[in-house]
Image: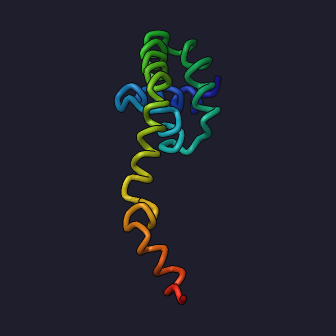
Amino acid sequence: MYAYIEERVLSVAEYIVEHEATVRSAASKFGISKSTVHHDMQVRLKSIDADLADKVRAILDKNKSERHIRGGMATYIKYKGKKSPSASTGNAAIAKKRGPIIL
């Protein structure tokens, strides 16, 4: 294995352990793809440092078990302050959009 690949694998693994980072955040931090991070952590790291590989595996398993919660919270935060106009002000908002009713 090339030396630069070993350095990258160890750097990414240390980052994941120190920050309890997700694969996505590690990939964006180092400017590599998520697939590369997965391959580095699953295959290459085992042959370089087995103890570090076990630590990384535990963190990635924890992140995987929590991802449905993270997705739900992200959606909650995204839509938190946004309400439909008819729900927040009742029928008055609808009437303003349509204009006055002429009989």
Residue in front for this viewpoint, 44 or 95: 95
Say which residue appears at 43% left-offset and 74% top-offset. 93
Say which residue appears at 52% left-offset and 38% top-offset. 24
Would you identify the image quadrant in which residue 55 lies?
A: top left
Position of the C terminus, as image quadrant, is bottom right
**Vertical position of residue 93 compared to residue 77: above or below:** below
Would you identify the image quadrant in which residue 32 lies?
A: top right
Q: How is the image coloured?
A: rainbow
> Where is residue 102 drawn, in percent x and y?
53, 89
Say which residue appears at 41% left-offset and 74% top-offset. 92
**Vertical position of residue 58 compared to residue 38: above or below:** above
> Where is residue 10 drawn, in percent x and y?
48, 26
Instruction: Answer left or right for 17 relative to 41.
Output: left
> Where is residue 21 drawn, in percent x and y?
42, 32
Q: How many marks?
A: 0
Residue in front for this viewpoint, 3 or 19: 19
Instruction: Answer left or right for 32 relative to 17.
Output: right
Say which residue appears at 55% left-offset and 26% top-offset. 6
Furthest residue in direction bottom, as rendered:
102
Position of the N terminus, as image quadrant, is top right
> Where is residue 74 drawn, in percent x and y?
44, 44
